[in-house]
Amino acid sequence: MIKNLIKHQKIKASLVVPFLALLFITSLVTVAFYQIRVANANQYRLLRDTYQLKIMLELTTQNLDSHLEVKDNEMIFPTKIDFSTGIVEIKWDEKSKVFDLSAHLKNGSTRSEKVYLVFNEKKVNEKTQ
């Protein structure tokens, strides 16, 4: 009878080790899936911010000539254009004759672009770099 008790205790104890191993493997897989999810979320935010910044800069570049007024030797243009996702600041660099566009999202992401304008007799051609 004592031998039967000991055998049953050994059987119960021997199931604990595989159960703990299975629990450990399950927790490792759970942590790995969580890290993949976090990495995907970060990559999505980065791509979304990049696309929003590029779209804001492209729209500003396309609309810059419609907001630009040239009278005699004076050039009048907006210094800031507001979008729902952020703002684009427009600065004129007299030395290099380029517009410096800086886009800022509300979450702090920024991107800048230089726009060269070539003035013809009646038309303004845009070149971006």
Image (tube, rainbow, N blue to C red):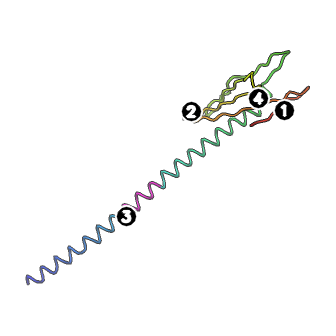
Q: Which is more toward the observer, 18 or 4?
A: 18
Q: Would you name the residue on which mark 4 appears?
A: 64
| Separation of residues labelled 4 and 2 (CA atoms) | 22 Å
Q: CA distance from mark 2 to mark 1?
A: 31 Å
Residue type, numbered disc 4: Leu
Q: Earlier in the sequence, mark 2 or mark 1?
A: 2
Name the front one of labels 1 and 3.
Answer: 1
Instruction: Measure the C-alpha gap from mark 3 to mark 4.
Output: 57 Å
- Report the residue marked by disc 1: 125
The span shown in magenta is 27-35
- Tag 3 residue: 26
Magenta stretch: residue 32 in it? yes
Q: Gap in Å between the C-alphas at discs 1 and 3?
A: 62 Å
From what the image shows, is residue 2 above or below residue 97? Answer: below
Q: Is residue 43 above or below residue 81?
A: below
Q: Are marks 4 and 2 in contact (CB under 8 Å)?
A: no
Q: Quadrant of residue 19?
A: bottom left
Q: First in sequence, mark 3 or 4: give its number.
A: 3
| Residue 106 disc label | 2
What kind of residue is marked 2?
Lys
